[in-house]
Image (cartoon, rainbow, N blue to C red):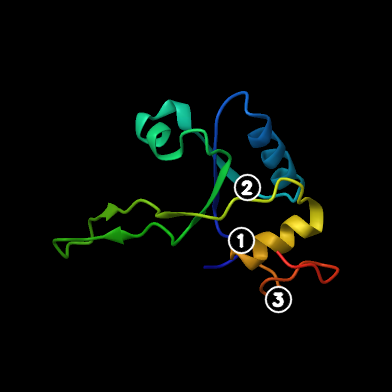
């Protein structure tokens, strides 16, 4: 993938943890796809009260042609949930955590944060 991968934030209206994570991610100038879990019964069952959840697109949507005629259908992105984001991470420490999980481009030593602290 080129550039920064797509990020999706599963959230719900009125969730202060969700709003806080969204704000910290936007401070890093990241583009987010916000999804309110309460708008989809399947997502309500999947996530329950376990929000916010940050997910990474595991590949770009592609076009598949079954007839070989050039006409095809676009496949949906596959989203992979990342581990819970530590609620106090912000700024460059948050960027390092995201890089360690493949969510943003950037050099990062796996398991390391700036200052030698582990994830």
First in sequence, mark 3 or 2: give its number: 2
Query: How far is disc 2 from disc 1 in space, using C-alphas?
Result: 9 Å
Horizontal and vertical percent position of residue 93: 78, 59
Image mark for residue 109: 3
Q: Nearer the viewer, residue 113 or 32?
A: 113
User: Sequence order check: which comes first, mark 2 or mark 1?
Assistant: 1
> Which secondary structure lies at badge 2?
loop
In-front residue for pair 86/58: 86
The alpha-carbon separation of the residues under discs 3 and 2 comes to 24 Å
Q: Relative to residue 9, is residue 41 depicted above or below?
A: above
Residue holding disc 1: 4
Secondary structure type for disc 3: loop
The location of residue 37, given as percent across then percent down, is 47, 32
Residue extending furthest left?
Answer: 67
Specify whether 15 is left or right of 95: left
**Marks 3,1: beta carbons within 8 A:** no
Q: In the rendered structure, which disc, 3 or 1, sits on the residue that comes first in sequence?
A: 1
Mark 1 element type: loop
Residue 31 is labelled as 2
87, above or below 117, in the image: above
Q: Position of residue 46 (x, y in %)?
A: 40, 39
């Amino acid at each position: 993938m080129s550039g920064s991968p797509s990020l999706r934030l599963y959230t719900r209206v009125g969730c202060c943890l969700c709003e806080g994570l969204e704000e910290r991610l936007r401070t890093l100038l990241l583009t987010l796809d916000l999804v309110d879990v309460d708008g989809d019964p399947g997502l309500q069952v999947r996530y329950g009260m376990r929000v916010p959840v940050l997910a990474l697109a595991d590949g770009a949507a592609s076009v598949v042609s079954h007839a070989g005629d050039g006409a095809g259908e676009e496949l949906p992105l596959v989203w992979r949930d990342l581990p819970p984001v530590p609620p106090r991470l912000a700024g460059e420490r948050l960027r390092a955590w995201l890089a360690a999980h493949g969510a943003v481009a950037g050099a990062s030593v796996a398991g390391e944060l700036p200052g030698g602290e582990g994830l």
